[in-house]
Amino acid sequence: TWTFADATFKNASGTVITALGNDFHSVIPSGTDNLYICTAIASSTESTDSVVAADWTSPQVISANGTSGTNSAVVFAYRRSSSALTTEKPDTARTYTFADGTFNNTDLGNSFTSNLPSGTASLYACTAVAASTGTTDEVAVADWSSPQVIAVQGADGADGADGSDGASGITTQNSYPYMGWSSGDNATTWVPSGTLDSTVAFRNGGTVVGDVTIRGTLDTSTGNVSLAEVGGEDTTDDITVTYSGQNSDSASATVALRNSANTATLAEATVIAVALNLGNLGK
């Protein structure tokens, strides 16, 4: 059993062991005989993994007594699969170059590749040992280990807790959005005869963040109306008033609540004033 925390093999009682059976060891043995190596992949979601006999690659000599030094490297083959792989392995021999750590072809056969493939299916890997006194080595089909899963797409996590309620929005109160004067005797008299006021208030929840009073005034001699700001209080943000059609029979005022930086309009309201001369209805 392989323990990931301390990178050692242990027996059932938890004692560290180096003998792996059939005269193989997890540490380099002393001596002058040729040195062979097998590799395997330990992979588990737990803290340990049981490395079985079928996981090991075929042996490769990496050091021979009285001969030139041997180049060696552990090489990997990768494949993604949505179904479990058990015995599948690369089925095409490829040449490995030690100097740059590459195969002469990344396609290792049987849907295995020497590069990590993209995708979300489970990722499997096989290992082999490339060993040669030359600059390259042919990695044969028989050299590869059985596949081991090394990465699995995780399941979606549980939904997070609901966020807190957002801030209250801006509401608008317009006490007199439409002001009207009318005359039925060809502008001799008007109803109403005086000025009209509309208070526009902007609220954030229960708090007034800005208000203004717009007064409409009728010029009885011309039948024209005009609007003007005559009162109000800006408590948090800025209020702007834009007028249109002043001193005509139809005028309007657009009241806008702007943020404190005056970079955005938070809310708007419109006050309209109209003077309607109906002619001489008495004739």
Image (cartoon, rainbow, N blue to C red):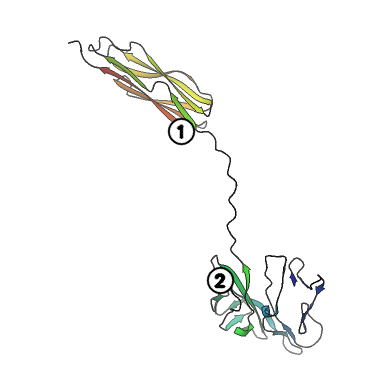
Q: Position of residue 1 (x, y in %)?
A: 75, 72
Q: Is residue 94 left or right of residue 63?
A: left
The answer to whether residue 199 is above or below residue 11 is: above
Residue that label 2 marks: 83
Could you tell me how far apart the alpha carbons at marks 2 and 1 are, in whole angstroms?
57 Å
Residue that label 1 marks: 265
**Residue 200 shows up from this direction:** yes
**Residue 140 shows up from this direction:** no
| Badge 2 vs badge 1, beta-carbon distance below 8 Å | no
Dot 2: element = loop
**52, 117: nearer the viewer:** 52
The answer to whether residue 221 is above or below residue 53 is: above
Dot 1: element = strand
The C terminus appears in which quarter of the rendering? top left
Please name the amino acid that badge 1 sits on: Thr
Please name the amino acid that badge 2 sits on: Ser
Residue 118, image quadrant: bottom right
Residue 142, image quadrant: bottom right
Identify the residue at the far bottom of this view.
66
